[in-house]
Structures are given as C-alpha cells and as structure tokens.
Image: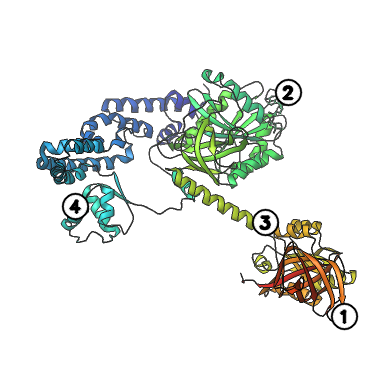
Amino acid sequence: MAKERIYELAKELKMPSKNLVKVANQQGMEIKSHMSSVTPAQAAKLREVVKNENGGQKKANTKPANHHKNHQAKDDHKKAPSNKHQNKRDHESHPKKANKPARHENERPREEHQNRHNEKRHNESRRNQNNGGRFGGSLNNNDRHGKRFNKKNKKRNKRNKGNNRLREVNHKQPTQRKDKPLPEVLEYTEGMNAQDLGKILHRSPAEIIKKLFMLGVMINQNQSLDKDTIELLATDYGIDAKEKVEVDVSDIDKMFEDEQNNTKHLVKRTPVVTVMGHVDHGKTTLLDKLRHSHVTEHEAGGITQEIGAYQVHYNDNLITFLDTPGHAAFTEMRARGANITDITVLVVAADDGVMPQTVEAIHHAQAAKTPIIVAVNKIDKPGANPDKVTEELAKYNLIPEDWGGDTIFVKISAKFGKNLDELLDMILLQAEMMELKANLDQNAAGSVVEARLDQGKGPVATVLVQQGTLHVGDPIVVGNTFGRVRTMTNENGRRIKTATPSTPVEITGLNEVPEAGDRFVVFDDEKTARAAGEARAKRAQDKERQKTSHVTLDNLFATMKKGKMKTLPLIIKADVQGSVEALSQSLQKIKVDGVRVDIIHQAVGAISQSDVTLAEASNAVIIGFNVRPTPVAKSLADSSNIDIRLHRVIYNAIEEVEDAMKGMLEPVYKEETIGEVEVRQIYKASKVGTIAGGMVTSGKITRDSKVRLVRDGVVVYEGELGSLKRFKDDVKEVKAGFECGLTIANYNDIKEKDVIEAYQMKEVPVK
Ligand SMILES: Nc1nc2c(ncn2[C@@H]2O[C@H](COP(=O)(O)OP(=O)(O)OP(=O)(O)O)[C@@H](O)[C@H]2O)c(=O)[nH]1
C-alpha cells in the first residue's frame, strides 16, 4: 500500500492535522508536518491510538486531552444553561450582557467572580427590600416610567404637591440609587473623587465614603483618590477595575494594533490569499476559474462586480482572494501598514519555470512573512516540466515535503481547472495550521484594498475587515478620512448590513477617498471619529507640505544636517553676461565641508516662470543679480515656496550663500515689497530734479518706503523716496488705483514706463 499523508489521515479521523502530528510524535514517529507521509503500518497504529483515545474519553465523558479550543468553547456553551438560573439576576441587572453569547473559557474566572459578586448584591438588595418593603419595589417601577409618572402625579395631586414631593424624596432616593446596576467594570482615571466614582458606580458619594471608611480609608467627597484606593473600592463592590488610558484618538495605528491583538472571544476566520507570479504564468486565469467555478448558487444571480477581492466557497469553507494588481502594490500596501495577506499562492508556469518576477514575488512574500503555496501551473502543456520548477525553486528555500522540505506544491492547470480543488484543500490546510482567528464581537478594524471616487456614490472603498464586525452606520476613520458607513456591498453587488473578519466589502459614506493600504478603525461615536479623522487629515497635510517645501537658504543648513543635501543647486540670473559669469565662478569657489554649489542654470535677463519651474523640479535656489522676477514668476515662486534671493552687490550674494552653507545665516531683515508704481509722465524741474507722475498699480507706496527703479525687468537704481505727492500736497501714502507724483532722492534718470517698486525691510524671526 502507498504511503499516506498526515493531513489525509487527519481528515479521515476528523481531527486537526496538527493534533495528529502531535499524536504521531508521542508515538515516536518522526513526523514534521501535515504534509509528512506515514507508512501503512504507522497509519494503522495512529488510527488505533486515536480511536482508543476517543473511545476512552467517551466513556469517561471528558474532553480529549488535546481537544481543539473551539470544541472546548462549545462545551462551555453547553454548560451555560446550568449557570443560567444562578445568573438570572445577573442578566437582569446587566441588560447588555443578557443578549451576549455564553462566555469563553478564558473568561470563566470573571464569571465566578461575578457570581460571588451577585450573591453579595443579592443580599444587599434583600436588605433593601426589607427596608423599603414592597413600596421599594413599586418605586422602582415608578422609576422605570420615570417622567411620565411624575407628570401625572403632579397633575393629580396639585394641591398635595408639597407633601407628595416630600414623600418621594424620603423614599425614593436611597433605593433608587441602589437598584441601579453596578457597571461590569469600573473604568476610572487616577485622581477621581468620591463624586466621580459615585456617578460611574450609580452610588451616592456618601455610600462610597462609608465603604472606604469601613475599609480603613478616610476621605472626603472631593478628595482625589489614588489608583490603589479606587481598585480597593472596586474589589469591595465585587467588580473589576480598569484604568482608562487617555488615548490619542487620531492614533488609529495604535487602535488598530490593539483591536488586532485582542485575544478574547476568538473564533476561526477565513484565510486571505494573494496570488502572485510572473507575467503570463496564469494568475488571472486561476483567479477567474476559481471565482466562476466556486460561486454558490444563491450568489450566481447577483451582479458580479470587480471589487479587488472576493470569496470562494469550498466544502463549507470560505477563502478570500485578493486581486492585487502587482507585487509592488502588494508591498506598497504592506509599507502602509496593511499586512492583510495570510497566504501567498505562487503561480509558476511549468513550461516556463522560475522567471524574474517569480523571484520578486518570492522576495515580497518572504519579506511579508506569509507562507507560500506553490501552484505549478500549465501542467497540461506539452512542454511542461514541473520537476524543473521544483528544482529551480529549491534555490529560494521552497522545497516540497518529498524532497525533505515543508513547502506545499500543487500541480495545476488553471485553464482546464485541473487540481484546483486540491489547491483549495491545501490553502485550507495551511490556514488551519496557522490557526487564524478573530473576534466578531468587537469594533471592526481592517484595511483598504482599493478606493475610488464614484460620481453618484462619492468616495467608495473596498475594505477588508480583519477584526470585529463592521456594521452599516458605524462611525469610521479610514486613513486620513472619516465618515459613517452608509452602505455595504459584497462582491456580488448585494447590500449587506454586517461584515465579519476576512470579508471584503465595498463601503460608502466616507468624506474623502482613502488610499489602498490605509487602515480603518471603527469608533464608538461619530464625534470622536470626526475629531480623529480631521486630526489625521491635518497631520497628513502638514507632512505633505513638508515634503514639498523646497530648499531655501534659510533651511539649507538644517537640510544639510539631516543628510538630505550634498549639493546646493542654484539658478543664476543677472543683468549682464559679465555678472552672470563673475557670480557663477565666485559661488562655485565656496568651500564648505560636505556640500558644494551646483549651478544648474545661468542666464541674462529677468527671472522667468521657467526659471521657477526648474527651481521647483530641482529643488534649487534662485539668485538674481540686478534683476527681478516677472509677476507670474513671482506669484509662482510664492505659491510653491521657491527661494529667490535678489542682490545688487556680488559680494553680498556670495556671502549670503556661504553663510547659509555654514549654517550661519541669520536673516534678521527681509525685504517685503509693498507696492508698485508705473511711471507715466516725466517732468523736469530745475530745483527738484526729475518728477515722475504715475499710477500705483498694486499695493501702496509710502513716504518712508525704499524704492527700486526697474526698467524692463532689470533694476537700474535702488534708493529712497525724495518726496511723495497727491496733486500739490505731500502725503504719507498712496494706495493702488490712485495717481501720484514722486521723486527719488539723488536720482534723476527716471523714464516713462519704468516701474518703481516700493519695499520695506521687515524683521524675520529666526526659526
Ligand atoms: N495551457 C494552459 N494555458 C494557460 C493555463 N493558465 C493560463 N494559461 C494561459 O496563459 C496565458 C496567460 O495567462 P494569464 O492568466 O493572463 O496570466 P497572468 O499571470 O495573469 O498574466 P498577467 O496578468 O499579465 O500578469 C493565457 O493565454 C492563458 O490562457 C494553463 O493552465 N494551461
């Protein structure tokens, strides 16, 4: 008889392969994994051992020693009814809990604790009953109907109002408080006082003070309590205490990790599989074939839509396949924190063998630490040589069991659907070994598979739930956006209301379009979700701005220190060729350790739009010598944060650059243009010299402003105003849209069409 695989035998014995491996090892068999083979004799022995074990246990009516956890959970469920009676009061007093399924094994100590606590409360409540008698009960009822009762009461007993109120106060207060249930857990922050705690515990501060007094702690109402005292109080009430950690609501990564690492109430979840491989090796064919051959009947009627992920039904199991567009996308998503793939199926064409992208895929999967299942494809082809593929893959540590390794290899033909069931079996087997689990009861957390803007629906995102259950209506933060899940659609175009772990769904209701690989976390309330989303959006925006902030002489040194700059790219514009060259040569001679000047462009003329664009693309600083930027260039430079330095003395330009490179630049003053005047007429007066009549075209000009005379984009003079007039009167300033007359101190060569730039020196705070 042929050898048998462990997983086949496990299937026959209806037990997890992993447990059978353990049994085999206990029997002294050298079995490595579920893929290992056993001889017929060994198989017989294992059958016998397992059967005996099961039989023995049935008699003893105990659980098998290595029984699967799920089964144990079931047992707990079975036990639940016997506790039910005892817990009845408990459930009544904790309405939320009553609907929840029976607790899991790891919660049992708490349940016992709870029972003890219930007993205690039972007594407490009995005492109350004794005090208040039946009246207490009816008041409780009254309390439930609350306001309505009081209203009626008021009307009916208008005349007796005073008396009535007195009676209510007398009877109601103590009992009302005590009948309200204690919370399951006392969530506190250190420093709370008896009043704060009273609110949480639904007890009067006086009671809390009394309780602590009995425990030997003397406090007053407003006294801040330390952690130990609060925990002592909780213990005395028979409930757990948990310190509320102040969380940064926008840190969804931390929340995601917390949700993800939750180990409570875990149940088995569906594996998430990514198919990778070289071009044309058959990824798409495989995904299509699986999709179309394993769609259940009730889904067949649905509209199949491309949502980048879908689930395959196989033998009562589900497998989620992600249709990632390429290896880079896979890693990009991982880089963004989305580790959503559990298993990688590596498709290798048997007629082509291992190719560059096969290797790339292996590296991506290995870096993500996801197990690889090799699907040797196209075995139907005449030139197919699966053994060659196996041989080639050995180099990358992918070795089949037969050859002494532990990688699963399945020979398939995607095109003809051959061995696809075996591939699915292997995926499920691998998943079983990984014990993939999640908690359905908690807030959902997961990742975005892809997202787009739909004209009708707004932002639409395909997300994969990785933990918890996602519901329609959930307040959600996704990457840097937020919203409330408005609709949820599965891959068959069906509207669904909830989505459990490993389920891909398309959601609407987000504010903006998130990015693939973004994480999402569900919040308890919309307000916090909005706050978190907005904080994240702002942070992202700031980051983006930082990314595009260009090098300036001011930030040059800091940028150099961060190791981001090895060269300082410069663009030089000057009025004459001689200046261009002189400046360029002098700048290149600057010697500062670790950084050098790189002149990427130099020319004669005004600073143009194309200079600014070039500076933007090359992260360069523009040095203008006796020239100005054109208006378009100036506004472009302002909006894209390009540093333009204007000089009239070569030495100053060189000194400024050198200081910046040495980190010594301390810009104390920076000039700020305040307005421009276009010269329209010239008058010559023998006493005062040349008077320019013109129009203020932008901003304003003030009597004390400095001026620069610009002719065809070139600065011809720089100085101070001699006078500023409106008609015949001296004025302090003239605003845009008004005419003015002016003279420049000690300068007469003003011509029509010259532009007079008015500027001031402003102090710049040192950053
Ligand atoms: N004979 C044979 N041909 C196959 C098989 N699987 C895929 N093909 C063919 O191989 C070609 C490429 O298959 P695809 O599924 O498009 O390959 P892919 O890996 O998705 O390629 P890219 O999407 O370009 O990366 C197609 O012509 C398929 O029909 C197979 O099992 N047997």
According to the picture, the residue beneath numbered tag 2 turns out to be 382
According to the picture, the residue beneath numbered tag 4 turns out to be 207
Can you tell me whether the CB of the residue at mark 4 lies under 8 Å from the nearest atom of ligand 1?
no
Q: How far apart are the two marked residues, 1 and 4, measured between alpha carbons?
A: 99 Å
| Residue 668 in the image: above or below residue 417 | below
Q: Residues within 10 Å of mark 3 (few under 14, many from 20)?
A: few
Q: How far apart are the two marked residues, 3 and 1, measured between alpha carbons?
A: 55 Å
Give the x, y percent position of residue 678.
81, 65
Give the x, y percent position of residue 12.
44, 23
Marked residue nearer the N-terminal end (2 or 4): 4
Please name the amino acid that badge 4 sits on.
Answer: Glu
Q: Nearer the viewer, mark 2 or mark 1?
A: 1
Secondary structure at badge 1 equals loop
Q: Nearer the viewer, mark 1 or mark 4?
A: 1
Front-most of 18 and 171? 171
According to the picture, the residue beneath numbered tag 1 turns out to be 686
Q: Residues within 10 Å of mark 2 (few under 14, many from 20)?
A: few
Quadrant in which the C terminus appears? bottom right
Marked residue nearer the N-terminal end (3 or 4): 4
Q: Nearer the viewer, mark 3 or mark 1?
A: 1
The answer to whether residue 503 of the structure is visible from this angle is no
| Residue at image point 36% right, 25% down | 51
Q: Residues within 10 Å of mark 1 (few under 14, many from 20)?
A: few
Secondary structure at badge 4 equals helix
According to the picture, the residue beneath numbered tag 3 turns out to be 548
